[in-house]
Amino acid sequence: MCNLIRFVVVLMLLSLPTGTYADSVQSTRVIDKNQHACTGGGGYPYRNKSEYVLKELDLKVGDVVVDIGAGDGWWAEKMAKFVGSEGTIHASEVEQKKVDRMKEKFADIPQLKPYLCPTDGTALADNSCDLAFLSKTYHHLNKGGHVDYLRHLRKVVKITGRLCVIEKHAAFASGRGKEHAWLPDLLFRQAEEAGWIPVRYELITGTYHYIAIFVQRELFTPEQGRK
């Protein structure tokens, strides 16, 4: 796990232009013993950090996103503004009543397309999405089927596309709340088994939730041997 976290940190640093580290990366130094305390209430406190999340996603006009387990369409609506009329937000749900509610609520946003999907996949065409987004959905996937689902997403997401997972860190959950949380190291193991490589992982400040972003393994060419 330590090596994996180091790998993610190195990738974060390498992705920054020269000379921007101090300005772009928040220090991890602990200056207040309460600085990591959860300050948001409710089941989705990270929604208060939507500006940060959307900045991380860096969506562009024309992008195609599948919002898996879109629920009430909260994230889908926000993402639709970034992809514009040229893009598409596939807001998937496994319950027809939720799909119907989203269709009625977002009837005036044509690029937001709610639809009923199966529990073991997205029912979308291969190589059709730029981003697969799961907000508090990963723990709801079929028990024992997480790796297979991630393999399915590898087919649906373009080679240059990404996978984003937001979950509550299970180490901070208690009681029945543990059923609605996931350990990041387990997510990393399952994702790598399915062919995804982590490029970003961070706890969302003021919450006990984390955001993890992955890309396709094929983007990494074999290291050339030293002479």
Image: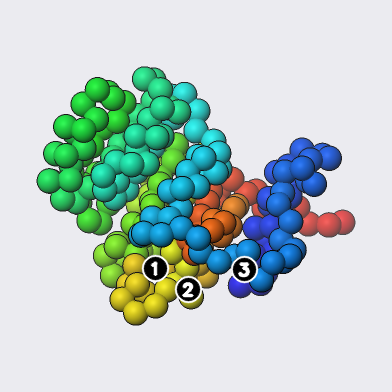
Name the residue that disc number 1 marks.
181
- Verify CB contact (< 8 Å) between mark 1 and mark 2: yes
**Residue type indicated by callout 1:** Ala
The tag earlier along the polypeptide, 1 or 2, is 2
- SS of the residue under disc 2: helix
Q: Quadrant of the N terminus?
A: bottom right
Query: Height in image: 142 above or below 174?
Result: above
- SS of the residue under disc 1: loop
Q: Residues within 10 Å of mark 3 (few under 14, many from 20)?
A: few
Tell me the mark number nearer the camera, choosing from 3 and 2.
3
The picture places residue 63, in percent across and down from the top left corner, at 44, 29
Query: Height in image: 26 above or below 52?
Result: below
Tell me the mark number nearer the camera, choosing from 1 and 2.
2
Q: Nearer the viewer, residue 225 or 25?
A: 25
**Residue type indicated by callout 3:** Asn
**Residue type indicated by callout 2:** Phe
Q: Residue at the location (43% across, 55% down)?
A: 45
